[in-house]
Image (cartoon, rainbow, N blue to C red):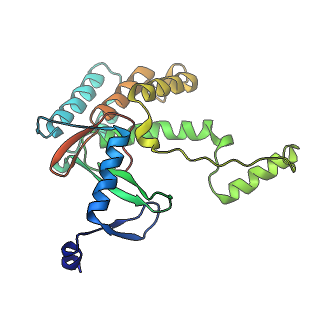
Amino acid sequence: MQRQLRKANIAVGQTDKSKLFFFIDAQEYEEKIKNYMNKTNAYQEITSGICPLADNLHLVILLLDHLLERKDITKEQHKKMYPNINKLELAHIYFNLKVHKPDISVRPIVASINAPARLLSSFLDQLLTPIYNYVTKDITFINGIDVVRKLKEYQLQGYLNSTTLFIVFDVTDLYTMIPRDGAIAALTRFCEKNATHGKIGTLKISTVIQLACVVLDTNSFAYKDKYYRQIKGGAMGS
């Protein structure tokens, strides 16, 4: 079957937000990917042709060692975030088809499970996500039951009536539309607003920001025998 598909120049992949597979003309698929990359301007080719893996590893280790030396992180935190040298590899990108959208566009997925900043990124996620979830709990729907419960509360407060409007909107290309500096500025404000005695957990806000910056600065991947750096937004994927 794979031979027949290659012969017919058909691309096969997984659809976005489902476990279904898609079959599409390979040239049309590549055209959609090219249009997406040109439209978002989120990816910059590394024209030197040199794999950025070693430089990314150096940046991560340099920062972690520096923070440990200054006692901004503990030895245990340093160990948690330190890259696994034996499993290290550069991230790669692939594109799922968004068949639930009218124009059937693509969604980029960056597979970075063994990238240098992967453990560092996971550490930040575990640190920040509980705070974010707590802060936004009143304006976030977890599931359908939660929607019903919150609508009931809304009704009991006298807000739900025949003139109430329900509005649905879709954010296009969320992961690639946010400028890097804007993301860091927003994170800084979030930390300042929700810090306890100037700290997020045991970390100073400046330490959290330094760690976040190195995650964004090392967001590189391979695609079609070329190397790229994501210069807008953040990576979606593992």
Residue 157, percent across and down?
A: 86, 43
Q: Nearer the viewer, residue 188 or 236?
A: 236
Residue 131, percent across and down?
A: 55, 36
Inspect this view and state whether residue 194 appears.
yes
Rendered position, 3 above or below 187? below
The reply, left or right, for residue 35 in relation to residue 167 is left
Residue 187, percent across and down?
A: 48, 28
Q: Quadrant of the N terminus?
A: bottom left
Inspect this view and state whether residue 238 appears.
no
Rendered position, 44 above or below 92? above
Rendered position, 237 above or below 198? below
**Residue placed at 18% from the left, 75% from the top?**
7
Residue 203, percent across and down?
A: 43, 26
Q: Nearer the viewer, residue 195 or 106?
A: 106
The reply, left or right, for residue 59 in relation to residue 39 is left
**Residue placed at 36% from the left, 34% from the top?**
232
Rendered position, 4 above or below 101? below
**Residue placed at 30% from the left, 18% from the top?**
70
Q: To which quarter of the image does residue 46 belong?
A: top left
**Residue placed at 22% from the left, 31% from the top?**
61
Count of marks placed on residues: 0
